[in-house]
Image (spheres, rainbow, N blue to C red):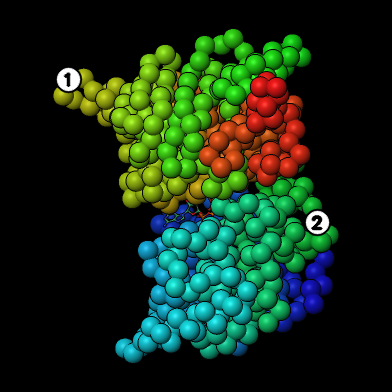
Amino acid sequence: MITESKAAGGGDRLLATPAVRLRNLSKTFGTTTVLHQLDLDIAAGETRGLVGENGSGKSTLIKILAGFHQPDHGAEIEIGETRLEGGLTPLLARELGLTFVHQDLALVTSLSVSDNMTMNALAASPSWRVSPKAELRATQTLLDSYELGVDARAAVSSLTQLQRAMVAIVRAIDGVKHSSSQGQSSLLVLDEPTVFLPKTDRTLLFDLARRHTNAGGCVLFVSHDLEECLEVTDTITVLRDGRLQGTLVSNDSDRADIIRMMVGKELNVVSHRRAVTPSGLATAATASTASAGSAPAAPDARPSALTVRELSDPAVHGISFDIAQGEVVGLTGLLGSGFEEVPYLVAGAGRGASGTIAVAGREFRARSLRPIDAIEAGIALIPGDRARQGSVSSLSVLDNISVQSLRANRRRFVIDWKGIRAASQQLITDYDVRPPKLDATYGTLSGGNQQKVMLAKWMQTGPKVVLLHEPTQGVDIGAREQIFDIVRAGADAGAGVLCASADQEQLALLCDRVLVMRDGSIVAELVGDDITKAAIASASLGSAPRSTDRSDSRKATRS
Ligand SMILES: Nc1ncnc2c1ncn2[C@@H]1O[C@H](COP(=O)(O)OP(=O)(O)OP(=O)(O)O)[C@@H](O)[C@H]1O
């Protein structure tokens, strides 16, 4: 049982027998120490949260547990009965029952569920003899024992996001059975595997994790979602700048307690929505009702930044909408409702699209729109998968941030590198990128700082339209506020912003208007103060819609 006080202060002082015990754990890259003498105990049967701002050292700690990084000299690591001098290797971590589910789930989507399971087992104990039939049977039995309702023969690509996450967790839990710990005292590390899932689906994942702790294992859950962390963990350890701030008992703590420890001060969540006067709201309501059945219109008389008409692809069915200059519009729905496709279609990055897209009056056919045309027209796309689609991780911050401005800094055949460097340095200072080092490798920056670099890269081009897909995924609460400020400043400079996101709180804080999609169509529009988490949720689910429900108002117009 855990008998720790609400705030444990400097060290980690759980009284139960630890399954994982870390002492004096530090990590230095070059001359920079990013973890400072951490002491951490996790007890058998415990679910521990790990939180901290971007760059506080969470991933580095996990990579040490996974044997990817070696800690500095002097660290002690004990896993169950095994005491290690120095660090782990990936094989040793596996043998000792440490198992990991990362955000990308690490499943090969073109292979079957059974093949994915077999690969994992083979990595644990290589064997020349594999019987596909026996593996299939064993996988099906395993999946059935967890009542997942998944066919072991199915390709992972055919599974829903929830099923994939559940398969990844079951695979991880099953992996520890092959370890020397046999599942006892084994540590399951969940590194934000829930970010892509709606809240309702996440509880199913945590039920699986609970089965692991009930069987004597323990869980380390890394998350930026503080409410969720409070709900599903027993205790929460807070890191700040690589130092352990303490461990809270989840039941006795609230979000404000965690934030205070994370950032060292109170942090008020404020709305970044444009102030709308009562008369403005009246105009907005009139506009959206009048436009019901066609395109949700921008709620004021500002010129249009983006006009989309009858946009279609296999997942999107003829949607039309407008975004005014200076307006931030949210686009949301359940996963699979089509909202996630839209930024990519508008940026010319989709396939087989139809319909038209006009930027500041210049019209394109979606079918023939290429990304280069979109960029030249003033469209900036900041994709959700910033590591693979928005940047080159192995290049420097300077290379990533300046790639869009090379042409503007070219004089005949010569590129003004000195000018680019000076401007880029100013940008990363203005955008509070930490560390503010142009020569740092982009991939070594924390998630929030990577996102700030992406925004700086595009915002310096003065875009007419900014398309954001999950702009604050994996971003801490402080950096999130900064990103909201950057987006709002872009809108104030005249850009029309589309923010496609399943994060209802983000939409409620940031957007002037929110369009909700179901089954590929826009079905509801929320404006101004009607944009609440509850209203977005009910419109997404199709239950008791509030504000202007377009399908309803269409019927009303017809009758
Ligand atoms: N391979 C590396 N080389 C140099 N510095 C690194 C390396 N990996 C991480 N860092 C630095 O270590 C610090 C901690 O990074 P880490 O990724 O552990 O933070 P985090 O808390 O996981 O952040 P996030 O929440 O954004 O994932 C950051 O300043 C980061 O730039």
Q: Which one is in front, 308 or 39?
A: 308
Whether residue 302 sits left or right of residue 43 in the image: it is left
Q: With respect to residue 346, does 496 lie above or below?
A: above
Q: With respect to residue 297, does 426 lie above or below?
A: below
Query: Which of the two labelled residues, at mark 2 and mark 1, occupies the earlier sequence position?
Result: 2
Q: Amino acid at mark 1?
A: Arg
Q: Secondary structure at mark 2?
A: loop
Q: Is residue 42 visible?
A: no
Q: Quadrant of residue 50?
A: bottom right
**Residue under pointer 2:** 253
Q: Quadrant of residue 186?
A: bottom right
Q: Indicate yes or no: mark 1 CB to ligand 1 under 8 Å.
A: no
**For the N terminus, which image quadrant?**
bottom right
Return the x and y of residue 133 as percentages of the image width and height: 41, 85
* Residue appearing at x 32%, y 39% in the figure: 399
* Residue appearing at x 60%, y 24% in the figure: 293
Q: Quadrant of residue 253?
A: bottom right
Q: Is residue 318 visible?
A: yes
Return the x and y of residue 3 as percentages of the image width and height: 82, 72
Whether residue 514 sits left or right of residue 468 in the image: it is right
**Residue under pointer 1:** 412
Q: Secondary structure at mark 1?
A: loop
Q: Amino acid at mark 2?
A: Ser
Q: Which one is in front, 175 or 408?
A: 175
